[in-house]
Image: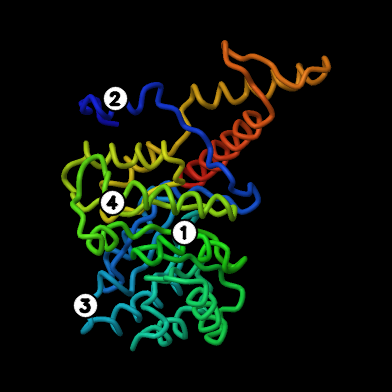
């Protein structure tokens, strides 16, 4: 998107590689290149979400909503869910913590409307995942998938037990702003203060076959640094990025979309490996690089993601 990238970005993105997410079940995967937080206290933002080329919308009742407007935000989210019209977009509701003054009322209000998922903030243990699911079930949302936010040092340390807590869990969402704050770290372009946390949580997600999405980028005007953050997350292995402004959506979508050369290479790998197998060989060479079965699996995931994105974009165009 941006042809004036700093040298560090150009070096890191050489070849503009896009490998499909590792360790994620094909049956549960869906594109989440961009997940836009929408403060539910602003109705026009909720309406605007129906027009954006975004993969997921997070109707936010928590962080972006003042205490005095919690009830109003909940009413707005309920109205938006009832009206629908969000098309292919995944619609997620971030509720307040289930043990807060608003959490149970949030769940009781939105669960009957069956959003695609409920996002629970500040989860720090397996027990809290199970408690959140129990609260959701009691509110009438027994079959609604959940996502959880990893946004504290304790959550990072317990990421593996959180990721493996329940089959209802369909995605981990990083809350990097709160995490950076609690680490007493600084925000840097290279994101070195949170690189371990990002990698550790990625390992936990992949160990349990879960998608994982990166945290937000707070500078809404510096698209060069935002694009750098997107490409870093992509190259680490993340599935997408949460965003806080519509202008960021196209950059996130671009970073996490397989490039045409990657798609073509994936097809070549699958065809060449099938030919090698037919000749009794378990490996082959494509463009001078050794290809084994693991590369075929990655190629299939790339084509799967490519096909899903093409279908989504065709649905939008229609």
Q: Secondary structure under badge 1? A: strand
Task: Answer above or below: position of 40 versus 25.
Answer: below
Task: Answer above or below: position of 245 versus 140.
Answer: above
- Please tell me which of labels 2 and 1 falls first in the chain: 2
Left or right: residue 286 versus residue 7 is right
Within-10-Å neighbours for mark 1: few <14, some 14–19, many 20+: many
Q: Secondary structure under badge 2? A: helix
Q: Residue furthest top?
A: 288
Q: Nearer the viewer, mark 1 or mark 4?
A: 1
Any mark on residue 66, and which?
3
Asked whether the beta carbons under mark 1 and mark 4 sit within 8 Å of each other, the answer is no
Q: Secondary structure under badge 4? A: helix
Any mark on residue 113, and which?
none
Number of marks in the rendered image? 4
Any mark on residue 172, and which?
1
Any mark on residue 246, and which?
4
Q: CA distance from mark 1 to mark 4?
A: 22 Å
Residue drawn at 51 percent across, 66 percent down:
162
Within-10-Å neighbours for mark 4: few <14, some 14–19, many 20+: some
- Please tell me which of labels 4 and 3 falls first in the chain: 3
Indicate the position of residue 306 as horizontal and vertical percent values. Answer: 54, 36
Of 230 and 126, the residue lying toward us: 126
């Amino acid at each position: 998107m941006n042809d004036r990238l700093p040298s560090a970005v150009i070096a890191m993105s050489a070849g503009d590689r896009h490998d499909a997410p590792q360790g994620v079940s094909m049956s549960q995967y869906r594109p989440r290149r961009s997940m836009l937080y929408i403060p539910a206290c602003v109705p026009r933002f909720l309406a605007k979400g129906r027009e954006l080329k975004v993969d997921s919308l997070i109707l936010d009742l928590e962080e972006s909503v003042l205490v005095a407007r919690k009830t109003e935000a909940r009413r707005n989210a309920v109205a938006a869910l009832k009206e629908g019209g969000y098309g292919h977009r995944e619609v997620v509701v971030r509720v307040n913590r289930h043990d807060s003054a608003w959490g149970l009322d949030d769940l009781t209000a939105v669960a009957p409307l069956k959003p695609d998922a409920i996002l629970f903030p500040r989860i720090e243990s397996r027990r809290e995942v199970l408690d959140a699911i129990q609260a959701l079930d009691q509110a009438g949302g027994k079959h609604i998938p959940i996502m959880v936010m990893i946004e504290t040092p304790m959550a990072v340390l317990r990421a593996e037990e959180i990721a493996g807590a329940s089959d209802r869990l369909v995605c981990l969402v990083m809350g990097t702003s709160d995490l950076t704050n609690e680490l007493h770290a600084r925000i840097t372009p290279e994101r070195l203060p949170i690189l371990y946390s990002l990698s550790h949580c990625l390992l936990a997600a992949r160990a349990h076959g879960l998608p994982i999405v990166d945290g937000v980028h707070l500078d809404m005007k510096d698209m060069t640094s935002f694009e750098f953050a997107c490409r870093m997350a992509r190259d680490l292995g993340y599935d997408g990025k949460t965003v806080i402004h519509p202008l960021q959506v196209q950059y996130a979508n671009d970073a996490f979309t397989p490039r045409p050369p990657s798609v073509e290479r994936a097809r070549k790998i699958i065809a060449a490996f099938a030919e090698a197998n037919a000749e009794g060989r378990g490996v082959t060479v494509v463009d001078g690089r050794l290809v084994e079965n693991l590369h075929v699996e990655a190629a299939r995931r790339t084509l799967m993601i490519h096909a899903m994105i093409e279908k989504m974009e065709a649905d939008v165009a229609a």
